[in-house]
Amino acid sequence: MKLGYCLGAAGVLLGLAYGAGRDWPVYLGSVDGLHYSPLTQINRKNVKNLQVAWTYDTGDEFPDSEMQCNPLIVDGVLYATSPRLRVFALDAATGKLRWSFEPLPRASRPGKIRSRGLMYWSDGKGDRRIYVAARQWLYALNADTGKPVPSFGSEGRIDLREGLGRDPNTISVSASTPGVIYKDLLILGSIVSEDLPAAPGDIRAFDVRTGKLRWTFHTIPRPGEYGYETWPKDAWKYAGGANNWAGMALDEKRGLVFVPTGSAAFDFYGADRKGDNLFANCLLALKAETGERVWHFQAVRHDVWDRDFPSPPVLVTLRRNGRPVDAVVQISKAGWIYVFERETGKPLFPIEYRKVPPSDVDGEELAPTQPFPLKPAPFARQEFTEDIVTRRTPEAREAVLRRLRQLRNGGQFTPPSLRGTIIFPGLDGGGEWGGPAFDPTTRILYVNSNEMVWVLRLVERSSGDLYGRLCASCHGSDLKGNPPEFPSLLNLKSTEAEIVKVILEGAGRMPAFSSMIGESAARNLARYIKSNGKMPAPRSGVQGPMLKYRLEGYGKFLDPDGYPAVEPPWGTLNAINLETGEYVWRIPFGEFPELVAKGIRNTGSENYGGPVVTAGGLLFIGATNHDRKFRAYDKDTGELLWETTLPAAGNATPATYEVNGRQYVVIAAGGGKWGNPSGGSYVAFALKQ
């Protein structure tokens, strides 16, 4: 009998095999991505007695800041990041600061920064390191002192823009989610621009000691490589995206790394990238030693819906026909769950390829068929019909119905349009970057989900207006943006010189426009922004062609009072038995305090950050945007056993660990999503002593 099926007295051994043990040394607890802990001190019977053990206030929050970090805990030390991306080490039992390192120049408002975690490595002989990505830099820090390791790259850092076959000064590349470490290799994805010009999303492995590039997998294939024919000729020279921003999972025994990728740039119109576009929107199985492709599955062919795979996969063991099968599980923004054999990529549940509608947008050629998994059933509703339009008030329902009847609507893979197309689940999912948790003792998968409707509308780019051509897709024609994902440009405190720098060099998902416009044009654009759009818009100085269409803006479909256009639940928490594909339980997740005050409860809400499941019978999760709650559920039934209110929303995945015989659960309370208050504290809970 395999260890994965030994229960009872062997439960502790099972937990140590699958989970993090007393420490939480890897992003999400373990390299297989389970979000699982074998600790049992905190359990169903006593969780009601949890209290705050310590709080660490970073003091680094600013308006619209976020903090999504899943901290690491190794040998009694907690490592994490602040909203300004300051890296620090705390005594994990007391929250007392040990050291701090600032990779970025300290500024009054550094702009949107996201870090979901760190990487830890030790050679077992005293060399212990923390790796963190900040802007284009990947740093190696001494885990004991927080100082950069001089032998890594140049003075402790490497430039992630280098080695991609493009001019490093004209592209924006960073990494918001940790990679994995296999032997002496640090395998990493990237976050790149989502509009052109964009860097390619190559998967790369660096020497963990020196930072030297050891191998590269080209997600936009080059001549002679598998998948090259799924793009136009020489697309690898100009196309971008197809990047792994969500994280990855590692099968150390087999030497396989499982890498989910996102869409190709530009996300919503692909006339310049005709074809299926491998390896965008794929789950890749690569040899960790060499980067060689073993197998792949493409969930969306020629994506124009921004249907990135949003989270790391989970490596599980299931029973099929009386025998154990090692599998890889991947959730999607559409609310689907894919389950494959790890070695072969063979689906464990059927997937059906169906015809989908063509596009009526000039120049666009969509794939004629797309894959639809038949089981498990999706964990989010799939089509926004009039039957599920909000009934919160008669007036709200009527207003939503009027607008809905003006839009294109037809379920999954309904093409983007100039009229406006319903996207449901929305551009944020369904499944999101927090990802699912898996209990190896029961083979149950737990996943939280958003149930929001979005509207995707394409508009023609202005041929002369520089702002309209480069900026309006994300920040809106009126400069108001869609905060906090795409910030308002009105009343910016940044100087003109700082704005010019960002325009030319890019930042995160924002392209670097230095290859398209010169400093003079960037300065004129900065002046236009600083005037809040009151100056005449600068005329185009763009070098080279641009796509004909852009996104009107990232827009959620809300009723006139600002609540979701769809009937509740607006967020859910789901438990699925992966051996049968059937749901064990499903509950609304999250509330709006102002609606609770009116007696309207259990609506669910948007939620960001994932769960942690424990051998103590519990499921811990923060995530909910509006109510700022941190909750513990009975993992078998979904019954709420404990909750508390955090200083700000816990839009992060918690961690649990043990120090000196005491179990703790810690979560980052960063808030800041969709205009909610920002915070900057880590709160750790433990049982009363």
Image (cartoon, helix red, strand yellow):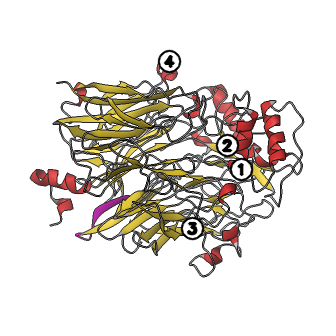
Q: Give SS at disc 1.
A: loop
Q: Mark 1 or mark 2: which is in front?
A: 2
Q: Quadrant of the N terminus?
A: bottom left
Callout 3 crowding tier (Cα within 10 Å): few <14, some 14–19, many ≥20: many
122 left or right, relative to 482:
left
Residue 439, position as x, y percentages in the image:
28, 51
Residue of label 3:
219
Mark 2 or 4 closer to N-term? 2
In the image, which is nearer the foreground, mark 2 or mark 3? 3
Which secondary structure, mark 3?
Answer: loop
Q: Is residue 275 above or below residue 246?
A: below
Amino acid type, mark 4: Lys
Q: CA distance from mark 1 to mark 4?
A: 34 Å
Magenta extent: 314-323
Residue identifier under label 4: 598
The type of residue carrying mark 2 is Tyr
Instruction: Please report the residue visible at 76 percent of the width from the left and 34 percent of the height from the top.
Output: 496
Q: Which of the two discs, 2 and 3, labels the residue nearer the N terminus? A: 3
Provide the residue designation for mark 1. Answer: 408
